[in-house]
Image: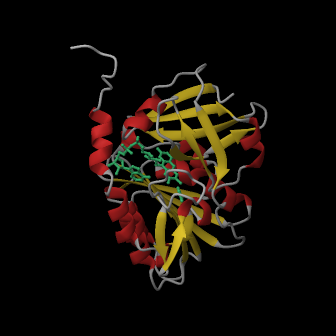
Amino acid sequence: MNRILAKRQLAPEVVLLEVEAPRIQKRWKAGQFIIIRPLAESERIPLTIVDSSAERQSITMVIQAIGKTTREAVALEPGQALADLVGPLGEPATISSEQRVVCMAGGVGVAELLPVAKAFHDAGNHVTALCGARSDAYRILDEELRSAVDVLQWATDDGTYGFEGNVVQLLLSMAGPGTFSEGHVIGPIPMMKAAAAATRGWGLKLHASLNPVMIDGTGMCGGCRVTVGGEVKFACVDGPEFDAHLVDFDELARRNRAYREMEQEALRHQCRVGLSD
Ligand SMILES: Cc1cc2nc3c(=O)[nH]c(=O)nc-3n(C[C@H](O)[C@H](O)[C@H](O)COP(=O)(O)OP(=O)(O)OC[C@H]3O[C@@H](n4cnc5c(N)ncnc54)[C@H](O)[C@@H]3O)c2cc1C
Ligand code: FES
């Protein structure tokens, strides 16, 4: 169970893993996620379900190696198995129909956006995807997105591909009030915050898929607490998608930074139990 069937490097430090998961493959919907433990001694981390195959009884995830556990996950090879895999978790994305939809993503968020953009398109919406990457070499899943949406535009920070700048600058260069009726944004917190600020008053219903620190993924530990419209929500069970115009992004950023020292220590730490001097 949980055997890795295929692995593909998409960009520096970004890897796609296809994993055997017959039950999750049948039940998942766009916007939902799984929690994995790559090795028996690893921590548990949430990852979005990007795709699935009924024929291969598998699901696909895309992982950016940024810390200890994501590095352990991207080091796995086909034939090895994940220690644990739980899901599908969270509420599916809100998918309406017959709207003009803008889907925005940055970094590894582009992979997380793909199933949502596809679902919007399959439901009869006109979908524009605006995707951001550091540079041309960091663009991921271009072909898959191109065949899933009506319009795809890229922004790169250094201008090596497409628009020079970030996704929100790209949005402002091509749209304004009334251009889109619905939107979805996923990526780094400053980007989601800027997208919400830029579109306030546009009459655009913007959903943000949030990425707080998660521990149990069942609504019990409080790790993923976020404030939305002044109310406390738990992203693992009430989300991860919320009304972007109501999310307290500053609080989310503060809470995600709270464990930074411990995370850096975990990356440096080498277990010496059982080693003699
Ligand atoms: C619902 C959900 C879906 C996600 N989907 C994906 C996905 O499809 N692909 C993917 O690569 N990542 C995804 N993430 C983020 C992923 O879970 C984190 O990158 C991972 O938990 C980091 O663990 P680590 O031990 O490797 O790094 P850590 O050592 O825990 O952290 C390294 C650095 O990353 C920051 N960080 C840690 N967790 C997060 C987070 N959740 N959001 C933003 N910054 C964080 C830390 O502050 C620190 O600076 C998702 C997160 C959520 C909540
Ligand atoms: S991860 Fe524990 S409450 Fe959401």
Image mark count: 0
At 47% from the left edge and 78% from the top edge, which residue is drawn? 245
User: Is residue 200 placed above or below 39 in the rendered structure?
Assistant: below
User: Is residue 99 placed above or below 53 in the rendered structure?
Assistant: below
Q: Quadrant of the C terminus?
A: top left
In the rendered image, is residue 93 in sight?
yes
Whether residue 178 sits left or right of residue 19 in the image: it is: left
Among the 4 quarters of the image, the one containing residue 154: bottom left
Q: Quadrant of the N terminus?
A: top right
Q: Tell me residue 59's x, y (percent).
A: 66, 38
In the rendered image, is residue 149 in sight?
no
User: Is residue 137 placed above or below 95 in the rendered structure?
Assistant: above
Question: Which residue ends up furthest to the top in the rendered image?
Answer: 276
Q: Tell me residue 15's x, y (percent).
A: 48, 34
At 42% from the left edge and 70% from the top edge, which residue is drawn? 195
At 52% from the left edge and 40% from the top edge, which residue is drawn? 62
Q: Tell me residue 263's x, y (percent).
A: 33, 44
Q: Tell me residue 53's x, y (percent).
A: 73, 37
Q: How is the image coloured?
A: secondary structure
At 65% from the left edge and 30% from the top edge, which residue is drawn? 2
Residue nearest the viewer, comparing 162 with 18:
18
User: Is residue 134 placed above or below 233 in the rendered structure?
Assistant: above
Question: Which residue ends up furthest to the left in the rendered image?
Answer: 277
Residue nearest the viewer, comparing 263 with 130:
263
Whether residue 13 sits left or right of residue 31 in the image: it is: left
